[in-house]
Every structure is written in C-alpha cells, then in structure tokens.
C-alpha cells in the first residue's frame, strides 16, 4: 500500500517513540503533535493498520504497537542436485531460491538440493535444500560437499592419515574413501538446512541415484 508523505512521517515518529520505550501516545496526542484533528489522525492510523505497519486495540486509548517486519529474504544460487548416497555428478545449472537471511552465512554461499537418504540420521532428507558456505577445507566431523574423481557427494568429513573418509549418517550404508592417487576436493561446508513443504516443487535439472 502506498503511503502519503504525511503518513510516512507519522509512522517514523511512532517508531521513534515506541523504540525508545516512551509512553504510547493517544490519537488525540498524536493529532496535536502533527497539527491535525483527532478524526484526521485516526484516518491516517487506519491507513498504517491496513499497510500492516501498526496494530491497535479499539478498546484501549494507548494501544498502538509496531508490526514486526517479516524476516529479510536473500537470493542464493541453486546449483542443481547432489547425492547424499553414492557420488554423482553435481550439475551446476544456476537458478536462485529465496531463503531467510539468518540461514545464509556472511561469506559467499550457494544451495544444493539433496537427493538420497544417506544423511537422514543428521536430519538431512531427500529433496531438502542445504545452504553451503564456500570453502576448500573442513574440520573432522563437518558435513561437506566433496568431489571425488570428478563426482560430488554430501557426507561427513574425516581426515585419517593418508586417506579421507566420507561418512554417511545412515547405519545401513558404508563410508566412502578418498585414497592417495584419487582426485579429491572440498567445495564447501554445510551451513544450514532449508526445507520446502510445497508439493510439486523441483530444484531444476538434477541427477538420479
């Protein structure tokens, strides 16, 4: 909803008053502050209510409250799907998804859609979206996007002597190993999980188990 300049000014004044913890003004007091009648101020406040900026209790004289803004969304590139089972090629066909800002690391991030059930004991399910912090190193026990001999997988990382163990979080599956001579790299560390509940959503081109 489009606000007039006067309505924007009233809203900003209310924000300052309420954020400072000062007493909530009555409609009459607000009208005096802005040189308008109580009726005119009431009309302006109704516009702010319809714009979901404030809420009021009609039964109380001092009941104006600010409406908390929704969490800011951040656009994150989505690079296809990644296997949480056997290593599969990660298809980097870039799309974008919007996720809450708190789920995205400050560093450059990207997202992958999980395919498979090897990480279910860590709460990572088939079709979940994982938010990845770009990195080339990891600590033991962190869940990483790893590429072995050109194929990508999502597993817990453990450096054991001269080899690397990629451990699934599924008791029915065996770990994968990167041995000397294998091509191995870390493409990022899992930062957070984003689960979509809408039916029929797809994450674009993918790969099959």
Image (cartoon, helix red, strand yellow):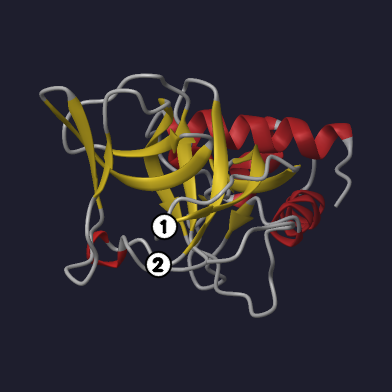
Q: Residue 190, how many percent across, how many down?
A: 38, 39
Q: Is residue 43 left or right of residue 54?
A: right
> Of residues 64 and 181, which is closer to you in this image?
181
> Of residues 101 and 200, which is closer to you in this image?
200
Q: Residues within 10 Å of mark 1 (few under 14, many from 20)?
A: many
Which labelled disc corresponds to residue 32?
none
Q: Quick one: SS at disc 1? A: loop
Q: Residue 9 is drawn in which quadrant?
A: top right
Quick check: can you spot residue 35? no
Q: Is residue 42 left or right of residue 6?
A: left
Quick check: can you spot residue 201? yes
Marks 1 and 2, Cα distance to the nearest angstrom?
15 Å
Q: Is residue 168 above or below residue 94?
A: below
> Of residues 119 and 75, which is closer to you in this image?
119
Q: Quick one: SS at disc 2? A: loop
- Residue drawn at x 63%, y 51% is 27
Q: Residue 175, how many percent across, how many down?
A: 23, 52
Farthest residue toward the bottom? Answer: 199
Residue on which disc 2 sits? 125
Residue on which disc 1 sits? 86
Mark closest to the chain's N terminus, 1 or 2: 1
- Residue drawn at x 75%, y 61% is 50
> Of residues 175 and 82, which is closer to you in this image?
175
Mark nearest the camera among 1 and 2 is 1
Q: Residue 173, how many percent across, how many down?
A: 24, 66
- Residue drawn at x 48%, y 66% is 60
Farthest residue toward the front? Answer: 181
Q: Residue 110, how many percent across, how many down?
A: 57, 35
Q: Is residue 71 left or right of residue 183?
A: right
Does the residue at mark 1 contact the one at mark 2 (Cβ under 8 Å)? no
């Amino acid at each position: 909803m489009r606000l007039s300049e006067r309505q924007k000014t009233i809203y900003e004044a209310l924000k300052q008053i309420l954020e400072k913890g000062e007493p909530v003004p009555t409609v009459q007091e607000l009208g005096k502050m802005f040189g308008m009648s109580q009726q005119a101020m009431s009309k302006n406040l109704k516009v702010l209510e319809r714009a979901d900026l404030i809420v009021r209790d009609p039964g109380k004289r001092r009941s104006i409250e600010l409406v908390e803004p929704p969490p800011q969304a951040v656009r994150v590139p989505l690079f296809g799907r990644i296997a949480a089972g056997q290593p599969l090629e990660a298809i980097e066909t870039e799309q974008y998804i919007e996720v809450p800002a708190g789920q995205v690391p400050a560093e450059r991030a990207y997202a992958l859609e999980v395919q498979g059930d090897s990480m279910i004991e860590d709460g990572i399910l088939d079709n979940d979206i994982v938010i990845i912090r770009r990195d080339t190193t990891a600590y033991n026990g962190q869940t990483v996007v790893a590429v072995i001999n050109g194929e990508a997988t999502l597993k817990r990382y453990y450096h054991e002597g001269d080899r690397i163990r990629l451990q699934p979080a599924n008791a029915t599956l065996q770990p994968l190993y990167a041995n000397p001579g294998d091509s191995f790299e870390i493409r990022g560390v899992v930062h957070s999980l984003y689960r979509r509940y809408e039916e029929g959503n797809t994450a674009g081109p993918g790969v099959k188990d």
